[in-house]
Amino acid sequence: MNKALKITGGELWLGLDTGGTYTDAVLLADGRRVVASAKALTTHWDLAVGLGNAIRAVLGAMPAGASRKDVQLVSVSTTLATNAVVENRFSPVASVLIGFDEPMLERSGLRRDGASPVIRVRGGHDATGEELEPLDEAALGAAIRDCGARVEGFAVAACFSVRNPAHELRARALIRTLTPKPVTCAHELSSKLDAPRRALTAALNARLTPQIRHLIEALTEVLEGESVDAPLMIVKGDGSLMKAEVALEYPVETILSGPAASVVGAGFLTGLGDFLVADMGGTTTDCAVVTGGRPAISAAGALIGGWRTMVEAVDVRTVGLGGDSQVSFDRNARFLVGPRKAMPLSLLALQFPTVLVELRLLAAMQHLPDYATQFAFRNPGRDAPAHLAGSERRVWEELTPEPRRVSKLAHSAPGLDSLRRLADSGLATIAAFTPSDAMHVLGQQHGWNVEAAELGARVLAIEERNARAARDTSTPAALCERTVEHVIRESARVVLATALAHDPAIEARNGSWGILGDGLIEDIVSGRPFASLVRANFALAAPLIAIGAPVAGYYPEVARRLGATLSIPEHAAVCNAVGAVAGVVTQTVDVFVNQPTFSVFRVHDPHDSAGNRDFQAPEPAIEYARKISGARALAAARRAGAVDPHVETTVSEHRAHMGPDLDYMAEALVRSTATGRPFAGHLHGER
């Protein structure tokens, strides 16, 4: 794109995003404007393949006068960590729990993964940072020697390590004398209390390290092959950036990387500071709220795949509704769109034209086989893992590199479940009728095989007629219109729910937005008047930014029903890739101060192996906390890739009242945040 543009002497930033269907790539000139973009199909069985295709495509669309030497920064937002957690695809790790009792272990949820051993040893500290009992180094060493060969890494969590990290640091040092495998300490991931959740977050971090390493190594190899010599950054779940080397240590922080990049990209492309954003991809729709240029952050920590982590991430409301959501009817003949994703039939026929023969045969039948609109095939370059269960192995052996009807692969509901598990693991792909197919039939989307989409709609209409024992069959166009209406209605519902959940006036009334009632909400999202004699206007107060490849076909009507000012910015289809490279590096360090005994003010430095420092008055304690939190935030930002970061420090005090005009500081939280633009240059020296 933009072949008329010329770049002379400027620098280019390359942004990448791996989505459910497409991997996007963009080039930004001088970090300000998009000068080239490209898409490639996401290869779930190996993300690096799709990333490589997108990189080569966008470099091929480079403006006149530019060269690969002008690329001085590369940044990627990735679904790898999120998908690994959701799909429970982990490397086995050992969790070392210091001072944990049985109820704490149960609350951590670490036993959900039976393949990863849990080691409990004596030790830990109390809430004031005092040692409860010595670390049992002998027991720890014996346990590490026993399981070290069976795991890929270690996670260490100790009671109240955020008040004194000494036992975690000592345990890590001991483990490193016994094995070269990576070790994650829980206190380095969160400064919040709640040892079981810190332990879970540390374990997830350790389990994700091999996957992130594979992605970084593969992406580095692609960049070297394309003669791109630039620093590589990865988007964190809060939308900020960090160097790839740092991401290797803290891969759990890349959870919700994709939705975070969409928020950053939406603000960058529109210049707005207050808005709602709806990011519609192939698999999901993600909605978030931005106020004053800052996205709302989940106070409780990111919730992914049933795991409540301590990762600070954008507060995103996600529904399984996208351009590639599977359209189907349940056993009660109810019309469903999603939440499962499928390859659109129109795309399947583009890649495998022989599918048209099967679809024509199906469309001519009066009595259809089960799962008539669904096809499946083996993903290239994948071998069956040794751990496949019997039913999964049987389905795997029936799969081929060419698409086959699902009815010939899965002869029952359990067989279909086995096939879906293979697809979730990246071993197979399932294709079915989707909203993208409906848009092709209605002439609102182009590029894939329209005949396959129309045949799929015809087969689905026959399925509905048979399920309802009806006399007439819907036309393909009518079924496609129902599909689009369903997507519009449910998209409006998630945008409305996101706005209501973040409305400060409603929050002040203890979250009582249910006063609207399900009936009124249904009227709003369906575009119907809620009464015949009363007229009321309903409007979103903040602009709605819609991004993602499919939004142009749905969101003008979504905005009309919600009374919203709509913005679909230029480059909305690659907004996440823009956000991946438009962010800044941000690192936050918290230092806690409390008064364990009268006139003793203790500074708890979670990064100091020497433990805590006591003062006799609150002022010098807080001043010391400000000093070390600011210094550590600066150092962390520079290590994460920031250039000339600046620091902002806040102090939140909690004061206890002893009587009229008499109070004292019980505790304080000193938070320093360092922010800077990412380093852009060549890996072997700036030009």
Image: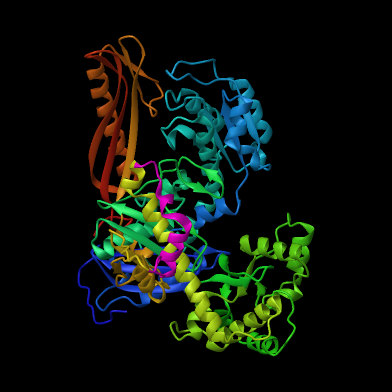
Q: Quadrant of the C terminus?
A: bottom left
Left/right of residue 363 with respect to residue 246 in the rendered view = right
Q: Is residue 349 above or below residue 245?
A: below
Residue farthest to the top? 598
Q: Quadrant of residue 592?
A: top left
Return the x and y of residue 107 as percentages of the image width and height: 59, 33
Residue farthest to the front? 533
Q: Quadrant of the N terminus?
A: bottom left
User: Residue visible at 55% across and 75% down?
Assistant: 434
User: Residue visible at 36% across and 42% down?
Assistant: 509
Return the x and y of residue 240 as percentages of the image width and height: 34, 50
Q: Is residue 643 above or below residue 578?
A: above
User: Residue visible at 33% across and 28% down?
Assistant: 591
Return the x and y of residue 289 as percentages of the image width and height: 34, 54
Q: Is residue 105 above or below residue 347?
A: above
Can I make out residue 640 in this image? yes
The span shown in magenta is 509-532
Return the x and y of residue 12 as percentages of the image width and height: 28, 66
Q: Quadrant of residue 669?
A: top left
Q: Quadrant of residue 625?
A: top left
